[in-house]
Every structure is written in structure tokens, then in C-alpha cells.
Amino acid sequence: MHIIESGNVAAATGVKLARAEVIAAYPITPQTPLTEKLSELVDSGKMKAEYIPVESEHSALAVCIAASSAGSRAFTATSANGLLYMNEQIHWAAGARLPIVMCVVNRGIGAPWTVWNDHQDSISQRDTGWIQLYACDHQQIIDTVIQAFYIAETVSVPVMVCYDGYLLSHTYMPFDIPEQDAVDRFLPKFAPAYFLHPDNPANLNTVTLPDIRPDVRGNMAPGYMEIRHNLHADMRRAISVVEEIDRKYQQAIGRGGSPLMEKYRCDDADFIAVCLGSLSYQLRDVVDTLRNEGVKTGVAGIRLYRPFPDKAVIAGLSHAKGLIVFEKALSYGNQGALYADIKSALYPVTDRPFVHNYILGLGGREIKTPDLLHAFRTSCTDFSNISDEPRWIGLKL
Amino acid sequence: MKDDKYGRFTSHSEPGPGDGGRTGSWRVVRPVIDHTKCIPVKSNKMACFTCWLYCPDNVITRTIPPTIDYQYCKGCEICAEECPVDAITMVAEAEFVKEEK
Amino acid sequence: MSEKTSILTLPEEELVHPGNRACAGCGLSIIYRIGLKALGRDTILVVPPSCLTVLQGLYPIASTQLPCLNVTFASTAAAATGVLGALRAQGREKTTVAAWAGDGGTSDIGIQALSGACERGENFIFICYDNEAYMNTGVQRSGTTPQGVITTTTPIRGKLQKKKEVPAIIAAHGIDYVATASAAYPLDLYDKIKKAKTISGPKYIHVHCPCPSGWGFDPRYTVKIGKLAVETGLYDIYEIDHGKFRLTGPSRKLESGKRKPVSEYFKTQSRFKALSAEKIQEIQKSIDEKWEGYHLF
């Protein structure tokens, strides 16, 4: 069924279709309408779930961590400072291997206060051991939320579904809502290997010693370092899982095909813009304009940011002369995080493209298409002077 | 797709004794029960068991006579202190070392 | 309370394994052992970092025989909420959910989540074992450290501020059961936990818990010192059952009996060595006034 609704409602609808059992959230702009919608669905009886109005984001994720440990499918959502307030729990959820799904409705972080969109919030959480998926439009939001539960439960790693505050969360766009039956056929029931139960008592997340030691049967149990190694190994395996689940989604629902990155006119492109989120759709206009001028350009929107699909970057983008990374976040004192990741992925390629970095849109600064065009064109024509220093778009010093 | 290919290890502990090893080795004094004074032994009735109630380490039994698991008893002396008839005395472990030799 | 449990009627079955890493003479060990008997096997525990984390055992061996979720310091009551949510979602509401935290995890870093859970009316038992400082990290002051106490962060003059009255704070949420207990009276604690299990909604039990190494006394006196705190009228054992306050057990007996001078309690522990005679007098006066208030009830 096609409807015209906001990105937040698309996310809430995905959560409902995925039959999340425990939902906990705390209000923060621009995530709030998502949890309002979920509370409405639960309160009206349209969705069978426990909605828990917690007193903080730290508690929101605590509820999800505990609910997931006790065997229920759990969901939360937040933005910006709310995400940062969860930070300790974000690491905890990954270390405890809990397949929680969380929507991060991207917003800049204070100080100074900003309620507008950029990506600093979720980018700052890239090293927490969560899978991060970025959606570019409303359809991708609902589809990705549904897939996120499957991905998370397959590899026992929590998943963040990130989408742009306001640009996607509050705008109204048409999208298709999959049938519940189809989603039920696609998404298996949550069946964790262990969950808290008095019939099978275990003590979870207990203190580990630096070295391994025997368990009650005298067998050596993996220690902290082994647990963390396996989290990493399973994160790497998750790349193919994301692809496989996308294929299954395509079979069940009929949409998909770009699980790792969404490429637009990239195949013969000499210069490819790379970015996260809805910006890639704005860049399509720029690409079309430059193509009309005779410059072979393309744009790749990275969908899976963690684990980083380095092989797909090589396979899909390394043929270009140049990659231009547009970012709404920054590793302060260094450069854009995605820029660094792209460069790192290309390192094994002998004849690798040059890579440029633009920082833009921080704190919701308007991203004007002519500015994007100017920057992109500059990078396509003047790449002799390759500097690691990020350049800024829309900066008014 | 759920199978063993994912090493979903977490810190998952199972119940068992002696996580801290044989904690009896912490002890410098050993509680010894004088059966001529101990209320349940003397009366041959289920009575008193103050030592059992207060033992922090669950090493005393509620039996006639009460027994102490020296493998794990940490020698805190609460049983000796709380015994209403002073039936428990604390004896230096050195005494037993000599004896065992 | 109906039938009072006695040493002979207390369940035999032990739910904590020996050979754990708690200090000799640990007050927490006494109440944890007896408390779990009251909670029973059909319970899920939620525990933040504290001495209990150590007592419970280091991975991969647990001294606790009940399912237990270790959680981050500030999140205990929220995590209990999450377990409850999952149990409701799965139709497993019969299982008791009990959070068990230290005084820091309750009164300081954990109070926001605890307050939230109490306000939401979550059906769980929250047990705070109050050893009156951050013992697991090496005896730093906490919100419930009494005035005058020497800790590693109040090393010279002792703590200048008063002890935070956590049970009163929790009672202000209007929940149906708030009680205090002491490691020196484990049977009273047992009966209170049993009673809490029969009441729905949040239940809060605050347990005074002597700590030999943190308080500076010989481990053999754990019970004696716990009793002295009550017998001097310094620490009172009571319950607020559906809003009705009453002193219980040994504290109730003090209503008509004679309280020991509080100085007797202070001199048993090195942590009180900074207390001046004047300060002791002042504290004695405030205890006397508190008990005058009880008599007015």
C-alpha cells in the first residue's frame, strides 16, 4: 500500500511490521514523532508491544538491553545528545551481542545547541561495535528498519538505522508499506541462543579477567579479548549477511539491490561523489548537470557504514579518476571520517583515484545545489593539488 | 541463517562453587565446635543454629551436629562471636598444620 | 506480617555457592544468601557494578544460582524495567524481578533510573544494600555515608554532610511498599522480601550492611555492629506498607525499651575516629529528637 507520510512514520511503520515486542524511548527532536507514533500504535491496540516511556535515553537503551537479554525483540530511537547520553549503553549492547535495533534521526550535537541535521551524532558512534545503515529516503527507511532486525538477529550485533533529521524525518513523501504477511514470511521470529530464564540460570556480562580461565566443566572459556575478537569477526561477516538479507527482501517484498551502497551513474564515471544519507539524492541533480556539461560523474551513497564495505568500494569506485567525499561530520583535528575510511579502503589499489574531502551542512547549514555543483566541478577540473585538508562548503567566516 | 558460524560469545557465567578458589586458604583461625556445649547436639533437637543463619559463606550445615566446610570457610569468626553458648572456638591454623604433619 | 520466619523454618536450600570472593565477614554475603532464599528460584536478578559483582563470581563461574543480568552502573532500575517488559511480552509475569544494588548504585548514580521506575509503577523489588560508601572501589564517600565518617575521599575531617535518606525519597513516589532492614536481622529481611513478593508495583527495601574492611572493625563483629546501629536508635528498621509507617522488629521494641548511647556504636569502628565529643553529642541529640517524633505517632 502506498501512502504519503513522514520519514518518522515510515520508521514507526517498519517497527510495527517487524513486530518489535519492547519499545523504550525518550523524547528528543527530531526523533520524537517516531516514538509518538509508536506509542499511539501501542496505546490504540494496533500494535502488540510494551511501550516504556523511560526517564532518559540511558534508560531507554537499558530497557532494550535487558529486554533483549530476556528474549524479546527490542527497539529504541534517538538523536544527537540523546545518542551521546546512551554512549555507555551503546558499547554495552554490542559487547553483550544483543540484536537491538535503534533509529538514529541524525542531528548535530551541542555545544552550542543545534536541533538541525548533520551526521556528527551517529558518526561519533562508529567504533562502538554496532552495524550502521544509512537511509536516503522514506522508502529506504521503512525497508531498512525491517531488514535491520533480521541482520541484527542473524549476527547478534545491534543495528543503527540512521536517517537525516527534518530532511527525511519531517518531510512527507510517498512510500510503499509492505504487507504484514510478506514481512512475516521474510523475518523469522526472534530466537536467541540464550535468554534469561530461571530454568536455565546464567549470569550475564560478569567481570572477565585478562586471561582465559576454565568454566564449571573445566573447559577453557573464551575471555574478554576472544569475545571482542569475535565481535569484530562477526561484524566483518555481517557485510555478506547484509547482502544476503537484501536479496531475501527483494524476493519477499520486491525491493532492494543496493545493500552496501547506492550508486548513481557510477559505472563509467571519472569522478564520483561519495556521501551518507539523503545528500546522495541531492547530488544526483549535480551529477546530471555535470554530465550535461560532458563531465562523466556519478554519486555513491554509502548505505552500510559499519562494518565498512571496503571491498565494495574498491570494486565499485576505484576505476574513477577521483572520488569526492561530501560529509556532514568531522573528526576534529583530522578530517572527515568517511573520507578517511574511503582512503583507507583504496590503499591496496595501485592505480587508485585521488580523494577530496568537503565538509558541509553542519548544524543544518543549508546545502545549496549550486554550491555542491561548484565544489564538484572544481574537484573534477583541478585535482593537481591534492591536499588532505578538508574544504568547507557554505562556510561564512 | 542462524548457525555456529557466528562466534556470538559473551560473558556468560554458569553457577558453580569455588569461583574464588578454595577460600578456606584465606583462614588464619579455624572455628571448632565443642559438641558438649552446642545446643542442638546437647539437646539432640533441631534448635538454635545461629551459626548457620549468620554464616556469610554458607559453609555451616543446619544438622545435628552442625558441620563446617573447611574447604571454603574463610574464618571470619562470626559463628564464634554469635554462638549463644560459646560452643565455637577459633583455633590457630598453625595448630592443624602441626597436627597434619 | 503473618507468621514470622524462624531459623528452623528458613528454607534449607542455598542459592549462593561458597568459595566466592567476598571478604571474610561480609555483611552483604549474609543478606544475599538469606535474601535469595526469600526471592526463590523463579527470579531474575539485575545487578550493577558493586561488591556484589565480585561476590557473584568472575566469568565464567557464577556463585549465584539464579539468572542474573549485570548492567551498567546507572541503569539498574531501567534494566529491571526491560526484563519486566520482556516477561510481559512473553507472558512470563510470574517470575519475580529483583534489582540488587549498593548504596552508590542506588542513592547516587542509580537514583534517576530508580525514580523513573518507581514513578512508572514497575512491578519489581529493588534491594539496596547500604554499606555506606563505595566499598568495591576502595571506600569512597557516597550519598549515604553518614556524617563524620572517614573514607578515602573524606580522609581527614570525615564526611561533612548528612546521610541521604533514600527510603524517604523512594517513599515520596507513593509506592506501596518501602522497608528498611539490617544484615544483623536476616530473618526480618527474609520476611520483608516475602511480603514484598505479594505486593504488585515497585517495592523498595533498604538494608544496612556492615562492612568490616570499609568500616574498620574485626570481621567477627559484623552482626554485633549491625545490631548496635539499631539498638542505639541510629539506624531504624521499619516499613511503609501502603503509606502506613511502622517500626518493626528490634526497632519496634525500642519504642518502649531503652536505647543504647550512640557513642557505643561509634567506638566500635575506626571510620568514626574523627568524630569529636561535641559532634557525638549533637548526633545523640538528633537521634533523641527523631525518637521523640516516633513516640508522637
Image: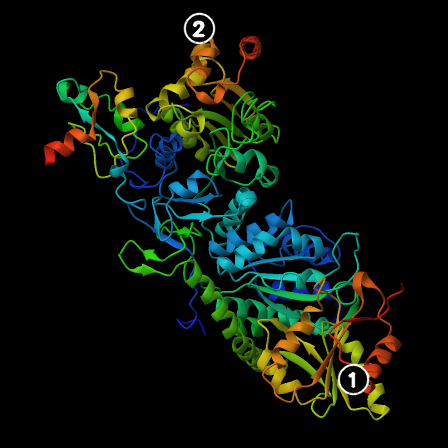
Apparent side of residue A393 relative to residue B47 in the rendered image (left or right): right
Crowding near the residue tagged with mark 1, few <14, some 14–19, many ≥20 C-alpha atoms within 10 Å = some
In the picture of the structure, the residue carrying the numbered disc 2 is C258
Q: Nearer the viewer, residue B52 or C96?
A: B52
Looking at the image, is A271 positioned above or below residue B1?
below
Crowding near the residue tagged with mark 2, few <14, some 14–19, many ≥20 C-alpha atoms within 10 Å = few
Apparent side of residue A88 relative to residue C193 in the rendered image (left or right): right
Kindly tell me whether residue C210 is visible in this rendering.
yes
SS type, badge 2:
loop
Q: Nearer the viewer, residue A41 or C118?
A: C118
* Identity, as a three-letter code, of the amino acid under mark 2: Lys
Kindly tell me whether residue A49 is visible in this rendering.
no
- Identify the subunit bearing mark 1: A
Q: Quadrant of residue C264?
A: top left
- Quarter of the picture containing the N terminus of chain C is top left
Whole-percent x, y for residue C34 in the image: 35, 32
Looking at the image, is A215 positioned above or below residue C256?
below
Apparent side of residue A397 relative to residue A132 in the rendered image (left or right): right
Could you tell me if the residues under marks 1 and 2 are in contact, i.e. CB atoms within 8 Å?
Answer: no
Whole-percent x, y for residue A384 in the image: 78, 85
Q: Nearer the viewer, residue B79 or A255?
A: B79
- Quarter of the picture containing the C terminus of chain C is top right
Q: CA distance from mark 1 to mark 2?
A: 91 Å
Whole-percent x, y for residue A290 in the image: 83, 87
Q: Nearer the viewer, mark 1 or mark 2?
A: 1
Colour scheme in the image? Answer: rainbow
* Identity, as a three-letter code, of the amino acid under mark 1: Phe
Looking at the image, is A95 positioned above or below residue C15?
below
In the picture of the structure, the residue carrying the numbered disc 1 is A383
Q: Quadrant of residue A255?
A: bottom right
Residue occupying the point 61% across, 23% down: C161
